[in-house]
Image (cartoon, rainbow, N blue to C red):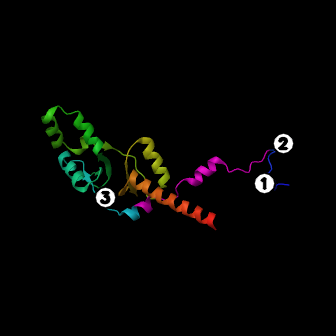
Amino acid sequence: MAPISYQGPRAHEKEQESHSQDPTLAFEKAKSQTTVAHILDDKGVTVYTITETTSIAAACADLSIKRIGVLPVIDGQGNLVGVLSERDIIRSMSNCDGEEGVQALMADQVQNIMTPAPITCTPDDKVSTIMEIMTEKRFRHMPVLQGGMLCGLVSITDLVNSRLIELELETLKIKQLMVG
């Protein structure tokens, strides 16, 4: 006779018991438990910023020299008021009329083309949650605030790399269990 856990449900039994794992529970367990703080610890906390009155030309130079894709925009008190991304610049340039329009844009201030009031996270947020938000909203960088002040910036690449490392470790654990 097969063990009880291997027996299928019988027609006369009123309550059918499943020995399978609840799929929603399995999905929740598979989600990353790593927090944004872990990524910031590994990555470092250097965050380049610009002010609202920085010229777009100066911001473009910063993006190019520092080889980054976004600059958080802060006000005089250090509060995050927006972000300036490569996409913001390209979108604005596509609306320019000829070289004179591009020159006028480059002389303009960041506050006129930045993305205001960006979605942010905290160091305590889970990587999986932030990945879902960034994927759904279709943006690649998220400012990290602690106590209302900018303390870091994470990119979708940071999050994916963190998750890949987690999955590699999980795979290694499973292989070790299989080998014994």
| First reached walking from the N terminus: tag 3 or tag 2 | 2
51 or 139, nearer to the observer: 139
Q: Position of residue 153 (x, y in %)?
A: 36, 55
**Pointers 3 and 2 in contact (C-beta within 8 Å):** no
Q: Residue 35, position in %: x, y?
A: 47, 59
Residue 40 in magenta stretch: no
- Displayed quadrant of residue 151: bottom left
Residue 8 visible: yes
Can you tell which mark lies on residue 47?
A: 3
Identified by mark 3, the residue type is Val
Q: Position of residue 174 (x, y in %)?
A: 59, 61
- Left or right of residue 28, residue 11 in this image: right
Q: Residues within 10 Å of mark 1 (few under 14, many from 20)?
A: few
Residue 5: mark in rendering: 1
- Read off the magenta span: 16-39
Q: Nearer the viewer, mark 1 or mark 3?
A: 1
Using the rendered image of the protein, determine whether residue 113 is visible from the camera's viewpoint. Answer: no
What amino acid does circle 2 point to? Answer: Lys
Badge number at residue 14: 2
